[in-house]
Image (cartoon, rainbow, N blue to C red):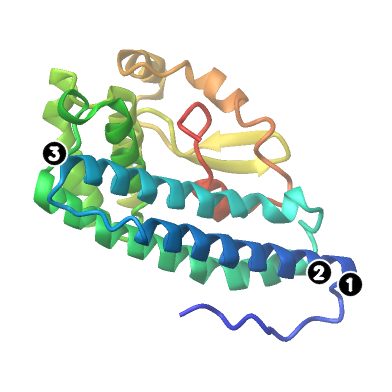
């Protein structure tokens, strides 16, 4: 269930900030409802391959739409204020519900069709399926299962090897283990990002190159305009990763 919209406000929230966070939440609710309604009207079927491509693309678009709002407080000038916390208190349950709905549908597609490999389904489907898995952090066993599924497909070119690297690291971090490619980290200040601990860090760039990733130093530098002083680690974790499909 969503957190009730009419929350008790702190006197410290300015009038402008109060308007801003409410406007952002209203915009999210309205646009999400419209997108869902418009798509439901298409009456697509899970047994039809072309319909499944549209469903998968729709789930991906909802995923990215929801995550675009993590930056709303910064974009609209109320980050670092009490209004930011008020916004996230109401927004987090919404994105959690959206993710849960997306994952249920995505799992039903996988149960019927298996992985959406590049050869049979195209690069876009492989990318969309990976991103939905990458964001399924509340279901680590599912992420582990997909990682096992993808490992042999990397060798045959049926899935993007850099995506596999991102998922490998995501699973490792979620499982409290060392990551291998240095893709997972968090903001440590304005314009600065730090990777979580990496196994054999001296050879990380060799491993990154093998899966088509830029050197770790370049990757760290790419967060210069993403990390803000007041940005939470949770917000960063759910933003689209630099260099990935937006």
Classify mark 3: residues with Cα within 10 Å, few (<14), some (14-19) or many (20+).
few
Could you tell me which residue is drawn at 19 percent across and 54 percent down? 45
Secondary structure at badge 1 equals helix
Structural distance between the alpha carbons of marks 2 and 1: 6 Å
What residue does disc 2 label?
19
Numbered label attached to residue 172: none
Horizontally, residue 114 falls left or right of residue 73, namely: left
Q: State the residue position of label 3.
A: 149
Tag nearer the camera, 3 or 2: 2
Q: Which residue is mark 1?
A: 15
**Along the line of sight, which residue is nearer the eye, 2 or 32?**
32
Q: Is residue 173 visible?
A: no
Residue 189 occupies which quadrant of the picture?
A: top right
Q: Nearer the viewer, residue 242 or 245?
A: 245
Q: Where is residue 136? Give x, y as percent.
A: 34, 54
Q: Relative to 9, is 120 above or below?
A: above
| Element at label 2 | helix
The local crowd at label 2, few if under 14, some if 14 to 19, many if 20 or more residues have their Cα within 10 Å, is few
Q: Quadrant of residue 81?
A: bottom right
Q: Residue 133: x, y in percent?
A: 30, 47
Q: Measured from the top left, where is residue 49 in percent x and y?
A: 17, 41
Query: Reading the chain from its start, which is encountered first: label 3 or label 2?
Result: 2
Quarter residue 82 falls in? bottom right
**Residue at image location 35% in from the left, 55% down from the top:** 137
User: Between marks 3 and 2, how big is the CA–CA gap?
Assistant: 47 Å
Residue at the image point whose x is 18% and y is 24% from the top: 158
């Amino acid at each position: 269930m969503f957190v009730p919209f009419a929350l008790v406000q702190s006197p410290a929230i300015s009038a402008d900030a109060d308007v801003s966070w409410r406007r952002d939440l209203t915009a999210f609710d309205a646009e999400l409802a419209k997108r869902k309604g418009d798509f439901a009207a298409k009456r697509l079927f899970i047994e039809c391959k072309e319909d499944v491509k549209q469903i998968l693309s729709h789930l991906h678009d909802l995923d990215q739409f929801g995550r675009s709002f993590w930056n709303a407080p910064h974009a609209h000038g109320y980050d670092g204020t009490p209004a930011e916390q008020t916004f996230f208190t109401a927004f987090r349950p919404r994105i959690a519900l959206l993710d849960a709905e997306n994952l249920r549908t995505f799992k039903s597609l996988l149960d019927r069709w298996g992985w959406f490999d590049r050869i049979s389904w195209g690069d876009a489907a492989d990318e969309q399926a990976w991103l939905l898995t990458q964001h399924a952090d509340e279901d680590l066993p599912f992420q582990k299962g997909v990682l096992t599924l993808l490992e042999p497909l990397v060798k045959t070119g049926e899935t993007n090897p850099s995506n596999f690297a991102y998922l490998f690291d995501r699973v490792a971090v979620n499982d409290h283990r060392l990551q291998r490619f240095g893709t997972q980290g968090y903001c440590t200040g304005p314009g600065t990002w730090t990777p979580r601990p990496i196994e054999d860090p001296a050879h990380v760039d060799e491993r990154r190159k093998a899966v088509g990733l830029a050197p770790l130093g370049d990757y760290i530098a790419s967060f210069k305009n993403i990390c803000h002083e007041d940005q939470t680690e949770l917000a960063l974790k759910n933003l689209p990763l630099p260099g990935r499909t937006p």
